[in-house]
Image (cartoon, rainbow, N blue to C red):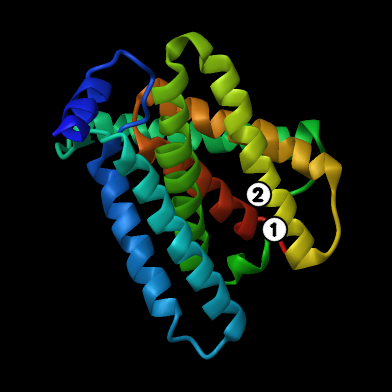
Amino acid sequence: MMRMERRKEIATLKTPYIEFDIVAILLATFSICLFAGGLLSQDQTYVNYSMFYLMFTIAGISLASLIGINVDRTLDRRELMMVLEYGIIGSMLIVIVQTAIFRTGMTSNIATLQIGAIIGGACAEELFFRGGLYNIQTSVYGEKFMFWTLISNNIVFTAFHFAKMKVLFNSINWIYLSAIFVSGIIITMAGVLSKKLSACMMTHMIFNILATMMGGE
């Protein structure tokens, strides 16, 4: 009973939550099906990848459920266009950050061998870092400490990519990690400004697709 009251209390707080909208729910469902199917692959690398991101997706949903984030089940055409606009603008900013400013090039990892993995990986990471972790941080610190929530969330996001880079390539590129940190802030702000988790997913997903199309390896 007390837990339900706490959820209602948190849900009504005027804090910059990133909401689970219907587009985000559909993308999350697609990702879960994708990774579940990936477990049947004959490629052990893809099986391991699918297992990891399936658990990552479930962890993100579990984190969000702890504070009872409201789910917006409506689908408004204007809101859908807004999500797409944030996704396109955000991904373009990330391209500029990674190529023009940090000069890291359009790089991607082993998961980009399949277009489904690009989409699923982006959705899983956004479910965990923005849908789960960011909203937990926001519920604890509120709007007053939004800047530090933004910074700390993307420090963890960058640390995750640090570990992934070490495992996949056994090397560390600090310039690339700096670009990842700034890119994470852009992705988070897309969600904060739109208040839609799908905006984060779209931004991340479109960038991953662009990275692959433009010769990432």
Q: Residue 68 lies in what quarter of the image?
A: top left
Q: Amino acid at mark 2?
A: Phe
Question: Residue 199 in the image: x percent, y percent?
Answer: 40, 36
Residue closer to the observer: 33 or 67: 67
Residue that sits furthest to the bottom in the current view? 42
Q: Which quadrant is the N terminus positioned in? A: top left
Question: Residue 173 in the image: x percent, y percent?
Answer: 85, 49
Left or right: residue 28 compared with residue 112: left
Q: Is residue 107 visible?
A: no
Question: Residue 124 in the image: x percent, y percent?
Answer: 46, 54
Q: Which mark is residue 10?
A: none
Residue under label 1, please give it: 164
Residue at the (42%, 32%) spot, across then down? 136
Left or right: residue 1 compared with residue 120: left
Q: Is residue 70 visible?
A: yes
Residue at the (51%, 16%) spot, across then down? 146
Residue under label 2, please give it: 160
Left or right: residue 189 compared with residue 195: right
Residue at the (42%, 53%) spot, across then down? 59
Q: In the structure shown, which secondary structural element does the residue marked by tag 2 occupy?
A: helix
User: How dense is the environment of label 1, judged by Cα within 10 Å: few (below 14), some, or many (20 and up)?
Assistant: some
Question: Residue 56 in the image: x percent, y percent?
Answer: 47, 57
Q: In the structure shown, which secondary structural element does the residue marked by tag 1 occupy?
A: helix
Residue that sits furthest to the front in the current view? 2
